[in-house]
Amino acid sequence: MVVPLSHSRGAEEYVYGPPTPCAHEKGMRENLLNGIQNKKLAAVAEKAIQGTPVSEEDAITMLTTNDILELGAIAHAVRTDLHGDRAFYGVNMNLNYTNVCELRCPLCAFSRDEGDEDAYLFSLEEIEERVREAVSLGIDEVHIVGGLHPGLRIDYFEEMLRRIKGVKPDLFIVALTAVEFDYLARMNDLTLEEVFGRLQDAGLGALPGGGAEIFDEGVREVIAPGKISGTRWLEVMRTAHSLGLQTNATLLHNHVEGPEEVVDHLSRIRELQDETGGFKTFVPLTYHDANTKVKAKRAGTTGFSDIRLYATSRVFLRNVPHLKALWMYVGEKMAQVLLRFGVDDIGATYHYEKVVHAAGAPTPDFGSEAHLRRLIETAGLDPVRATADYQPVKRDRIA
Ligand code: SF4
């Protein structure tokens, strides 16, 4: 699909209103081309301006370039064209309902076996209580992921969502990865359509993008051999999209992947997006290896590697509207810098997050709304508080 810069959509398609003056109106298109000396990046910029999808070879060029300012200029032009000066954040809670998981993937620091001293499973009463407490903190959304617990059936999840809606009917619920949906279908002898339908009836609003990791089978065999394949992950998402559920897509990097596997991953997401249009956000995740069985490439990623990955994703996945840099994974300062390298969403407050912190992320386990707004404002952008479907939330809803 050809979507040139500045002509990608009509203002009526923006749920949050038309963007502020964009790349085209500011004459940035010309400046963009004039300012790029690297010939390969200039060719990428030309394609970005014309709306021609960039090639896998272009993606490798972007992922390996040292000209990060030129790459960033291209990514920022695409980001500005899509969202103007807006940058999004959310006010939410994380609900990691259990850490018991059958798979015990080598990459995972969060999971436990049933019976382990620190294994846990929240009762429905506990969940309701936690949500009630978080509502008093002013949340708009509940983000739910957990492990593959062999003792849980679909009625637990239906009742969980109903109780959450019972606490506050307009809470937006983002729940369960493709891996959990596949498991629920198998454990309950239901089709995916039936599982999605039942949870939609109970209040499901959208799916997070976890479990994608890296689609390449060789890499998957090392980091998560028991997990559904990349092909199955995409099938689950295709089904969700066909039922009107929007989803995220993630990519886990900083383990054993190389640039080719990253590009393959991006390509497969772009392909499915061309077919369904159901991915709203792409979310690269930095791998942290504390308490896992797979060593990270580096204790932390470098600024250059983060910038290359996010900017490349923005340019390559031109058909996925949003690019999120979770401040909790990349650090607040890097998340802020990435707002000028293609990112338009820095994540949310994440009250009670457990998964990435089990793997040693050094960030605090929640960010205040004031802090997230300050990060966006001091990057020269306009903060928009939104739920995962990018519906803006009026700030007078803050408790
Ligand atoms: S990564 Fe997910 S599926 Fe794998 S062990 Fe951890 S919780 Fe389970």
Image: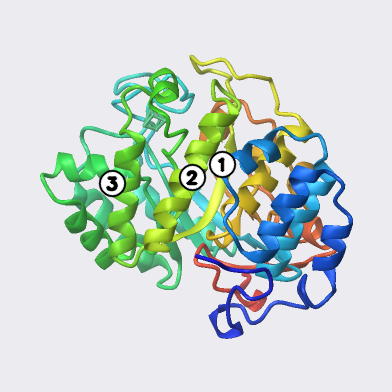
Q: Label 3 is placed on what type of residue? A: Phe
Front-most of 358 and 36?
A: 36
User: Which residue is found at the position 70% from the left and 47% from the top?
Assistant: 311
Q: Nearer the viewer, mark 2 or mark 3?
A: 2
How far apart are labels 2 and 3 at the CA level?
A: 23 Å
Look at the image and tell me in which quarter the C terminus lies.
bottom right
Q: Is residue 379 visible?
A: no
Residue for badge 3: 181
Residue for badge 1: 56
Q: Characterize the local packing of mark 3: few (<14), some (14-19) or many (20 or more) Cα atoms within 10 angstroms.
A: many
Instruction: Looking at this view, name the residue that lies furthest to the bottom.
Output: 12
Residue for badge 2: 267
Residue 12: image quadrant is bottom right
Circles 2 and 1, Cβ within 8 Å, touching? The answer is: yes
How far apart are labels 1 and 3 at the CA level?
A: 31 Å
Tell which circle, 2 or 3, labels the residue nearer the N-terminal end. 3
Residue 237 position, x and y percent, is 34, 52
Q: Is residue 90 above or below residue 86?
A: above
Residue 373 position, x and y percent, is 76, 61
